[in-house]
């Protein structure tokens, strides 16, 4: 029998007014939770051991970051996937993304269980057009377009290297997708469709029991679904737009959660006064830690 999920009250660990807080990433060797504010073009770093905060400013909107080694990260920017040393500010490599679609930007991104990088794109003005695609960057830095025709891509969250969840936020649908070893989709089905009063499915993560933890934009909560799509737990927040979540902390049982103030009116901001802040939630389950990006030896030598 699966044990019942127990969670603490959300604790605000960085009170701020992020316009579009996103991209939570736990980096164990830095004792730090990383996140971004897409619209302010910022990376935010909080060391949870000494509570030191750091803001890194960028020249483009950033959807996510993924860790390679030491201070080297992959940054998902508007029109560009950038490999950079965040300490020295050195740009190691820039990979153009969708230069034929100047209104698009990279949104959410995660590594899979093999250390490959997956990310999605979307229409930055958020018009009702399906210009978004899902990509995988393999160990040789070859880019594969795996899926297309999304309004707003979010996720993904991986069960293993062949099975994962991926979201189209505007369509309010979370898909369960199966791929083969050539990165071709062999099965895709709607796993969950949000009801009109539930807000919009945003970022998500998976725990060791393969439950899916989903952030509700406009919904002030995170929902947990089991493998049968059944809602088994819900966490309420004093913030309206919940955007992204990831497990981390010393024992990998702490959920870090980003939020946003985007689109909120004065009344909403008074009601949900912690909107835009970063939260942590203690849980009785362990999460899947995001893998570092794994590159082939040849690519490592040529880059680093």
Image (cartoon, rainbow, N blue to C red):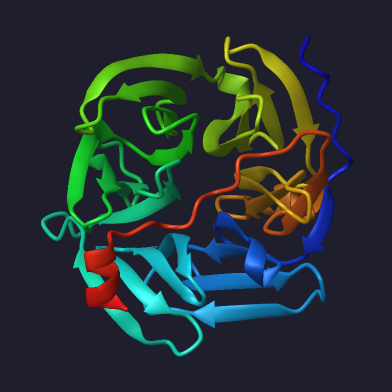
- Residue 104, position in %: x, y? 26, 54
Q: Quadrant location of the N terminus?
A: top right
Q: Can you say whether 43 is above or below 89 in the image? A: above
Image point (42%, 64%), residue name: 62
Observer-nearest of 162 and 55: 162
**Of 255 and 219, which appears nearest the observer?**
255
**Quadrant of the rendered image containing residue 179:** top left
Furthest-front residue in this view: 297
Question: Where's residue 146, x and y in %?
Answer: 23, 35
Q: Quadrant of residue 102?
A: bottom left
Snapshot quadrant of residue 198: top right
- Number of numbered discs overlaid on the protein picture: 0
Question: With respect to residue 272, does 42 lie above or below?
Answer: below
- Give the residue at x 53% y 32%: 201
Side (left or right) of 298 relative to 189: left
Q: Position of residue 112 (x, y in %)?
A: 43, 42
Residue at 35 percent of width and 65 percent of height? 77
Picture coordinates of residue 131 (x, y %)?
22, 41
From the viewer's perspective, is 175 left or right of 249? Answer: left
Q: Quadrant of the C terminus?
A: bottom left
Residue 3 lies, with reference to residue 90, above or below; the image says above
């Amino acid at each position: 029998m699966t044990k019942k999920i127990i969670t603490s009250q959300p604790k605000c660990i960085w009170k701020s007014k992020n316009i579009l807080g996103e991209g939570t990433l736990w980096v164990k060797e830095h004792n730090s939770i990383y996140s971004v504010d897409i619209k302010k073009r910022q990376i935010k770093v909080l060391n949870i051991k000494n509570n030191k905060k750091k803001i890194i400013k960028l020249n483009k909107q950033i959807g996510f970051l993924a860790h390679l080694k030491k201070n080297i990260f992959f940054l998902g920017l508007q029109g560009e996937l950038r490999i950079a040393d965040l300490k020295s500010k050195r740009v190691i490599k820039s990979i153009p993304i969708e230069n034929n679609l100047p209104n698009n930007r990279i949104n959410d991104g995660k590594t899979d269980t093999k250390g490959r990088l997956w990310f999605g794109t979307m229409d930055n003005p958020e018009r009702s057009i399906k210009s978004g695609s899902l990509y995988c960057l393999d160990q040789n830095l070859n880019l594969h377009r795996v899926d297309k025709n999304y309004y707003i891509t979010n996720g993904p969250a991986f069960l293993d290297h062949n099975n994962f969840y991926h979201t189209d936020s505007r369509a309010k649908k979370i898909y369960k997708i199966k791929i083969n070893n050539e990165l071709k989709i062999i099965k895709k089905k709607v796993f969950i469709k949000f009801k009109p009063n539930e807000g919009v499915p945003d970022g998500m993560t998976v725990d060791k029991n393969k439950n899916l933890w989903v952030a509700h934009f406009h919904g002030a909560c995170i929902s947990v679904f089991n493998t049968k799509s059944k809602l088994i737990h819900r966490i309420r927040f004093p913030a309206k737009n919940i955007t992204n979540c990831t497990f981390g902390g010393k024992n990998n049982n702490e959920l870090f959660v980003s939020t946003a103030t985007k689109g909120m009116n004065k009344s909403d901001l008074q009601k949900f006064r912690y909107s835009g802040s970063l939260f942590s939630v203690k849980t009785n389950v362990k999460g899947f830690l995001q893998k570092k990006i794994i590159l082939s030896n040849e690519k490592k030598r040529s880059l680093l």
